[in-house]
């Protein structure tokens, strides 16, 4: 430090190096009292006034507990605990993992620098200290620290908001109590799986018992995923609740939903949807599809599932579109499987083949498990098979509905 210019003779660029960071907190760690005082004067001349001092690493760790610095100005060669060990202690503590540590040392060899950086140093200046360079580096590290803190606060706030949105999205889906009540009243047992590919998803589904004893069910898959797709699920859930399904056929329900959705979705966004009614009197599943995946049903004794028809124009593209009424037999003991397209778009074959599992591949996986009497075990096993087949990069929803009586 002896060759540093006196603090009152610092050039303007040095005095301005930490401009705007007067509230920053700096801890000076050096066993030499003269060096500490010179560094203190230099920082104060640069506009930093919240400064603490420590004589070695052990002393510094104690001071940090109450002072909580934004930057440590650290000497390497000290008694008790040197700067290398202090750096290692800091980086081992989650609270100080990202704290900038600016080393100032007379050790100038490349291997000394490498050792300091390996221990956790952020920056390095050699003695004798150049005042302009030191303040410039202090300013850079403090600004980076301030930006990192802002980023961490933004991340924390975003996480909180996403957690709230996740909870809201989860409340849209039927819970275990509601499904148990449905089974007790109708004999329709439901096993469900919902896994968004990111914090929020673009899939959702619903099921309810109608006054006449039929059971209405639908599954929706919006284009894309994440926040944008999740917002669309809230829109469509509100539309479905407003329309209701008591007096509408599945095809009429889709047409009504589509007309309303066309005026709400931004250009280029759309949704696929399957909606249907399980009619226990007729023993049939009446449904309509807007470009959904093909529903699969199998009866006791079947060797493979029967595939329905999922064709139709997606929702949100053309307001005047109509949808076809379709049906599948669903006698007592039958199982119905509905799923989003993530289950059939799993890459297979590897390399440049660009092949995916597709509906027939999924039906083959299902056929291997039709002997399982336990619905939860069947669905869990199928999901394990899908995961083993390849990476699932989209929101995945899977519903297994069994007609008990």
Image: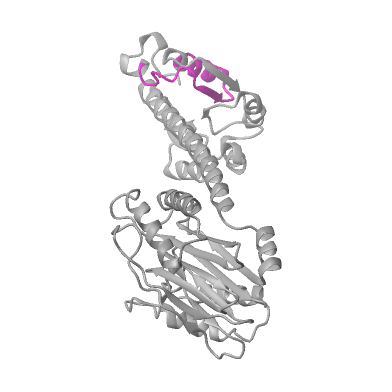
User: In the visual, does 280 lie left or right of 342?
Assistant: right
* Residue lying farthest to the right in this orientation: 184
Would you place residue 152 above or below residue 290 in this image?
above
Q: What stretch is highlighted in magenta?
A: 16-42
* Residue 32 higher or lower than 248, as above or below: above
Q: Which colour scheme is used?
A: one colour
- At 53% from the left and 51% from the top, the residue drawn is 169
- Can residue 292 be spotted in the picture? no
Q: Foreground residue, 288 or 295?
A: 288
Q: Is 337 situated left or right of 132 in this image?
A: right
Q: Where is residue 211 in the image (x, y as percent from the top left)?
A: 61, 62
185 vs 381, nearest the viewer: 185
Is residue 314 visible to us here? yes
Image quarter of the N terminus: top left
- Is residue 251 within the magenta segment? no
Residue at point 62%, 69% (across, down): 191
- Residue 385 position, x and y percent, is 54, 77
Q: Relative to residue 118, is residue 94 drawn left or right?
A: right
370 or 404: nearer the viewer: 404
């Amino acid at each position: 430090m002896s060759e540093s210019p006196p603090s009152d003779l610092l050039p303007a660029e040095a005095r301005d190096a930490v401009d705007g960071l007067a509230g920053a907190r700096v801890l000076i760690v050096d066993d030499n009292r003269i060096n500490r005082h010179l560094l203190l004067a230099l920082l104060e001349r640069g506009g930093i006034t919240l400064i603490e001092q420590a004589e070695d690493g052990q002393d510094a760790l104690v001071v940090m507990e109450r002072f909580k610095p934004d930057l440590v100005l650290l000497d390497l060669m000290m008694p008790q605990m040197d700067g290398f060990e202090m750096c290692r202690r800091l980086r081992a503590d989650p609270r100080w993992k990202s704290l900038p540590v600016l080393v100032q040392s007379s050790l100038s060899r490349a291997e000394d620098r490498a050792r300091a950086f390996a221990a956790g140093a952020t920056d390095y200046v050699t003695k004798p200290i150049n005042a302009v360079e030191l303040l410039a580096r202090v300013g850079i590290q403090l600004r980076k620290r301030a930006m990192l803190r802002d980023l961490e606060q933004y991340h924390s706030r975003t996480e909180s908001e996403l957690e709230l949105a996740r909870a809201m999205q989860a409340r849209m889906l039927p819970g275990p109590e509601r499904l148990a009540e449905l089974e007790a009243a109708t004999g329709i047992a439901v096993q469900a799986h919902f896994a968004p590919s990111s914090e929020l998803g673009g899939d959702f589904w619903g099921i309810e018992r109608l006054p006449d004893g039929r059971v209405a069910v639908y599954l929706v898959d919006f284009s894309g995923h994440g926040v944008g797709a999740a917002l669309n699920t809230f829109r469509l859930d509100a539309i479905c609740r407003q329309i209701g399904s008591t007096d509408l056929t599945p095809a009429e329900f889709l047409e009504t939903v589509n007309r309303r959705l066309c005026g709400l979705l931004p250009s280029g966004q759309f949704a696929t949807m399957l909606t249907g009614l399980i009619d226990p009197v007729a023993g049939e599943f009446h449904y309509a599809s807007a470009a959904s995946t093909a529903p699969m049903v199998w009866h006791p004794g079947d060797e493979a599932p029967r595939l329905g028809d999922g064709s139709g124009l997606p929702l949100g593209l053309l307001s005047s579109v109509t949808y076809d009424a379709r049906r599948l037999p669903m006698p007592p003991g039958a199982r119905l499987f509905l799923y989003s397209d993530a289950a059939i778009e799993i890459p297979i074959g590897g390399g440049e083949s660009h092949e995916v599992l597709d509906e027939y591949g999924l039906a083959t996986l299902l056929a291997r498990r039709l002997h399982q009497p336990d619905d939860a075990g069947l669905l869990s096993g199928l999901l394990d098979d899908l995961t083993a087949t390849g990476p699932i990069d989209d929101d995945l929803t899977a519903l297994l509905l069994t007609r008990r009586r």
